[in-house]
Image: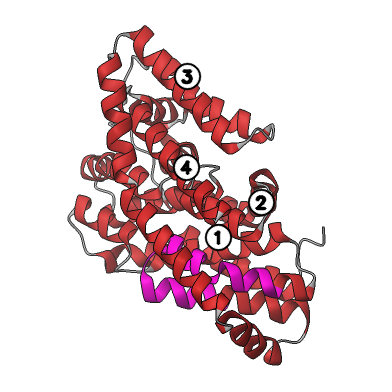
Amino acid sequence: DVNIMLMIWIFVLAGAFAASTKAMGAVDATVALTLKIVPEAFLPVGIFLAACFTSISVGTSVGTIVALTPIASAIAEQTGCDTAWLVAIVVGGALFGDNLSFISDTTIAATQTQGCEMKDKFKTNFRLVLPAAVIALLLYIFQWEAVTDVTVAENIQWFKVIPYITIIAVALCGVNVLLTLIIGIVVAGTIGLLSGDISPITILTSMGDGIEGMCELILVTMFAGGLLYIVKLKGGMDILVKALSAKVKGKRGAEASISFLTAVANICTANNTIAILTVGPIAKELSGKYGIEPRRSASLMDITSCFIQGVLPYGAQLLMASGLATISPLAIIPHLYYPILIGTMLILTILLQWPKR
């Protein structure tokens, strides 16, 4: 299948890009730069923005959580702040960026299954989640007591952020995602070599490690694609769509069905990408029947999976965050303002059919 093969190549290049940028120090530079720019009175905002920018650049919420959770834990220890609260900020920011990133596996899966452009899905998604992000930021500001004893790096190699900025800028210009990733890898490798932080061997090794890290996702994608095609070939997809359509009345009902199926699949698999791949063909059928734009259905699936994955105590994100911070996943959930807010926005956008365009 052409779409499955394209998705696999995107995963390969995304893994290579994420690993190469990490090897040349882009992740650390991004975190340090964000914390440096943001005043200490707004430190939670800085942590949230650092998580947002890092995850939207590298395309992985888990990778962002791994990078920032130790920093959040250290800040909590220094300031006496609730560790679960600061870690929840990291998780929320990581999910915000992962949901919007051009190289996120959920974005790739959603856009490929619905047949829409990534930049169109990004614009639709952004309008839906921005209010949730703003409200979450306000909550972080009002609940935070400013401190003055947090140590932030003085010498920040800001130029190492360029690969991330390049990826975002090129993707927003509508350049093919494969070419965008290749450009990002070349820029990251060039900066790393010129700065003397990595060697050609290190670049190739890190790219190989990044691709290897994507192997499980690639295999799952291939098996899921094959299984779903067999189901479709034997008429199973038609039966499911007819069963759903019988109870669906209008566009609002179709959108609710798409979100509900994505949520159920995500709860069962604890993997948002697999959930989107599973529901994608059904969502496309319902969208075509009830006049839902592909960008809209892709956004609904991605936001739903982001919300569910963000509050699952047995999901990879919360398990990783709780493990690094040595706290219970259940302690983090009450502070997950952003995932809960986007869940609320999801319900409102379906009920009110907003935005109109």
Going from the N terminus, do you reach mark 1 or mark 3 first?
3
Amino acid carrying mark 1 in the image: Asp
Q: Quadrant of the C terminus?
A: bottom right
Residue behind mark 2: 121
**CA distance for labels 3 and 2:** 25 Å
In x, y percent, where is residue 251? 76, 76
Amino acid carrying mark 3 in the image: Val
Residue behind mark 1: 302
What label does residue 215 carry, if any? none
Q: SS for tag 1? A: helix
Q: Is residue 155 above or below residue 286?
A: above
Whether residues under marks 1 and 2 lie with C-beta atoms below 8 angstroms apart, the answer is: yes
In x, y percent, where is residue 347? 63, 73
Going from the N terminus, do you reach mark 4 or mark 1 first?
4
Crowding near the residue tagged with mark 4, few <14, some 14–19, many ≥20 C-alpha atoms within 10 Å: some
Residue behind mark 3: 187
Going from the N terminus, do you reach mark 3 or mark 2 first?
2
Asked if residue 198 shows in the view, the reply is no
Residue behind mark 4: 9
Q: Residue at x 77, y 61 (%)?
A: 355
